[in-house]
């Protein structure tokens, strides 16, 4: 881990032995600037997690802290593919659209007319065979986000604050390394109550001279 020393329970924060993000991340952070959703993203912490199937590696559904960490969570998925599973405890309804795979094994866009075996057996054709979207409680839904090797995923908005994220054991088929970058929350950013401490930590982080802490 490359980041400040923090006690989330007591909400205490200090630089501690933090000497910055590692030098090898400087190029990665620079390339992030090409992503419009990452405009102004200044990482203050980097966490490297090593997942191995023989160890049963996984991470349960959770929210990342939002007292210290800002809205955007950025994860780089390395070495092998996996699935990021999103779940929600809310009773609010969400609209689900039926999708069907085509003959190439690809999913058709929601609402596409698709001739299924059920349609064929019923003798129905065309629009009369299109299944309708349905409303279900959010807590009954799991959203599977497929992450190819060397892909980048950004969680923000509802995906950050309303939906928990997890990596299940069954989705770790080979060794996987996840590099997660986090930015500061508003409290530690410009105009925030602890802006000065935030500036100090960012100066350290973006020196890219760090060693693991």
Image: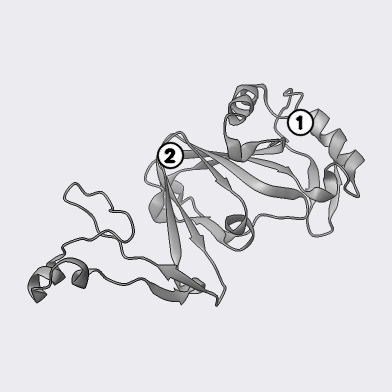
- Estimate the x, y position of residue 70 in percent, counting from the top left: 72, 48
Q: Nearer the viewer, residue 167 or 16?
A: 167
Left or right: 104 in relation to 8: left
Against 210, residue 183 (above or below) is below
Q: In the image shown, does 47 or 87 lie closer to the viewer?
A: 87
Work out whether 64 lies above or below 24.
below
Q: Secondary structure at mark 2?
A: loop
The label on residue 175 is 2
Position of 50 with respect to 115 (left or right) is right
Count of numbered tags = 2
Q: Which quarter of the figure has residue 144?
A: bottom left
Pick the front one: 29 or 35 = 35
- Residue 164 rendering spot, x and y as whole percentages: 57, 61
Task: Quarter of the image for the C terminus: give it.
Answer: top right
Residue 118 seen in this snapshot: yes
Q: Please tell me how crowded label 1 is: few (under 14), some (14-19), or many (20+) other residues with Cα within 10 Å.
A: many
* Numbered mark located on residue 64 in the image: none
- Asked which quadrant contains residue 208, the reply is top right
Q: Residues within 10 Å of mark 2 (few under 14, many from 20)?
A: some
Where residue 41 appears, as percent x and y from the top left, is 69, 37
Q: Residue at x 71, y 42 (%)?
A: 183
Label 2 and label 1: CA atoms lie apart by 28 Å
Q: Which residue is mark 1?
A: 205
Q: Position of residue 60 (x, y in %)?
A: 54, 59
Q: What residue is drawn where x is 89% and y is 42%?
A: 195
């Amino acid at each position: 881990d490359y980041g400040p020393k923090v006690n989330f329970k007591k909400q205490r924060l200090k630089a501690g032995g933090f000497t910055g993000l590692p030098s090898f991340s400087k190029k990665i952070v620079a390339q992030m600037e090409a992503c419009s959703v990452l405009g102004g993203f200044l990482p203050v912490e980097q966490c490297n997690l090593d997942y191995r199937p023989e160890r049963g590696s996984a991470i349960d559904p959770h929210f990342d802290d939002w007292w210290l960490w800002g809205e955007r969570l950025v994860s780089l998925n390395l070495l092998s593919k996996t699935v990021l599973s999103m779940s929600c405890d809310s009773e609010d309804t969400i609209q689900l659209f039926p999708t069907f795979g085509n003959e190439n094994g690809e999913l058709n866009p929601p609402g596409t007319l698709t001739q299924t075996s059920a349609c064929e057996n019923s003798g129905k054709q065309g629009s009369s065979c299109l299944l309708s979207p349905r409303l279900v409680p959010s807590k009954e839904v799991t959203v599977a986000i497929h992450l190819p090797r060397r892909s980048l995923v950004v969680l923000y908005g509802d995906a950050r604050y309303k939906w928990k994220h997890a990596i299940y054991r069954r989705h770790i088929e080979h060794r996987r390394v996840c590099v997660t970058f986090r930015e500061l929350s508003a409290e530690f950013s410009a105009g925030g109550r602890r802006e000065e401490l935030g500036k100090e930590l960012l100066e350290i982080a973006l020196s890219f001279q760090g060693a693991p802490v």
